[in-house]
Image (cartoon, rainbow, N blue to C red):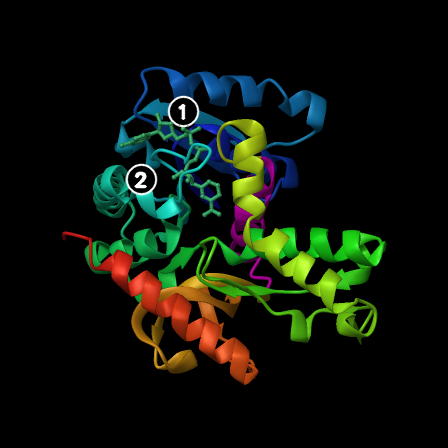
Amino acid sequence: MKVTVVGAGAVGASCAEYIAMKNFASEVVLVDIKEGFAEGKAMDLMQTASLNGFDTKITGTTGDYSKTAGSDVAVITSGIPRKPGMTREELIGINAGIVKEVTENLVKHSPNVIIIVVSNPMDTMAYLVHKTSGLPKERIIGMGGALDSARFKYRLAEALEAPISDVDGMVIAAHSDTGMLPLLSKATRNGVPVTAFLSEEKQNYVIEETKVGGATLTKLLGTSAWYAPGAAVSTIVHAIACDQKKMIPCSLMLNGEYGQSDICLGVPAIIGRNGVEKIVEVELTDAEKAKFEEAAKAVREVNGDLKF
Ligand code: NAI
């Protein structure tokens, strides 16, 4: 399994590190536009191999895409992250151009690649990759729900005063502060609905803190987070590499599912060696359906700013 990670910044390097630590990939190629940066990150990471016990070979290149040829999976993290007070949507002007150019370079050298889109605004960047790459829709996966669900579980465990391994939950719809939809109605503690344990006030706390999970960290760090985003990407790459058929919420091109078409939104899907193997339709409450539709409307507006 050869994996390319474009953007050797905070998220790209974290993702490469988690992939290497899990030891399922033979090769990770880091690509960055900053001279020597990807090479430096790759060398630093390789010098952890004997300490951390992995055999994945990590190399870096300043924009030479011939080194990425034959990649099975490519992760796009290139672009600018948000600063405190910014929304993800404000990044579109710069990131759309970068994502489009990177996609063209990736597909040229790896025509059968599966692309995982991370750069923000992610749902719109995933849509852009669908419109410009020529890849089948099963081979384009936007990463948002995996991270947002991990943040949801963190907040659920906090509110329940339970270990995280006790809780399960999922976030769907848009990867934005307003469009995220944590499915509280389906969240459980060891199979028991969490609503049985949490007061309405605590339920609202969990939902609101999950939705601003990224913004809270951006305020604390001065830039957006990287550990959990990197781990979330590596989980998707792992599911592909080992054909796990794992159910992960991802931003996918919808064709009638959840009542939406020609839009990328977060929905649960089975992820395996072929990328998206099946979109799973779960029953939503009327309130959740309305929120999903609102999120779709907002994402469509941002998509309208794209120039192909
Ligand atoms: P960063 O600034 O640390 O790294 C971005 C890297 O991309 C830089 O090293 C930069 O030199 C490189 N780059 C820029 N243009 C390039 C090009 N044309 N080709 C190759 N490399 C290029 O940013 P960070 O924190 O790693 O975030 C990256 C992106 O991921 C941002 O857009 C951020 O908003 C997004 N993000 C998305 C998440 C999600 O859940 N989908 C979670 C966290 C971040």
Sort mark 2 into few (<14), some (14-19) or many (20+) by Cα contacts within 10 Å: some
Instruction: Identify the residue at image location x=70%, y=27%.
Output: 52
Observer-nearest of 59 and 224: 224
Task: Measure the C-alpha gap from mark 1 to mark 2.
Answer: 13 Å
Q: Is residue 31 magenta?
A: no
Determine the quadrant in which ligand 1 lies: top left
Is residue 236 covered in magenta? yes
- Amino acid carrying mark 2 in the image: Ala
> Mark 1, mark 2: which one is toward the viewer?
1
**Residue 206's spot in the image, x, y percent?**
68, 58
Q: Is residue 24 visible?
A: yes
Q: For residue 112, which quarter of the picture? A: bottom left
Provide the secondary structure element on which disc 2 rests: loop
The residue beneath circle 2 is: 69
- What x and y, as percent, mark residue 288? 53, 76
Could you tell me which residue is drawn at 79 percent across and 66 percent down?
198
Kind of residue at badge 1: Gly
Image location of residue 88, percent across then percent down: 39, 45
Q: Residue at x 64, y 35 (%)?
A: 21
In the structure shown, which secondary structural element does the residue marked by tag 1 occupy? strand
The span shown in magenta is 227-244
Which residue bears the numbered disc 1?
60
On the image, which quarter does residue 274 sit in? bottom left
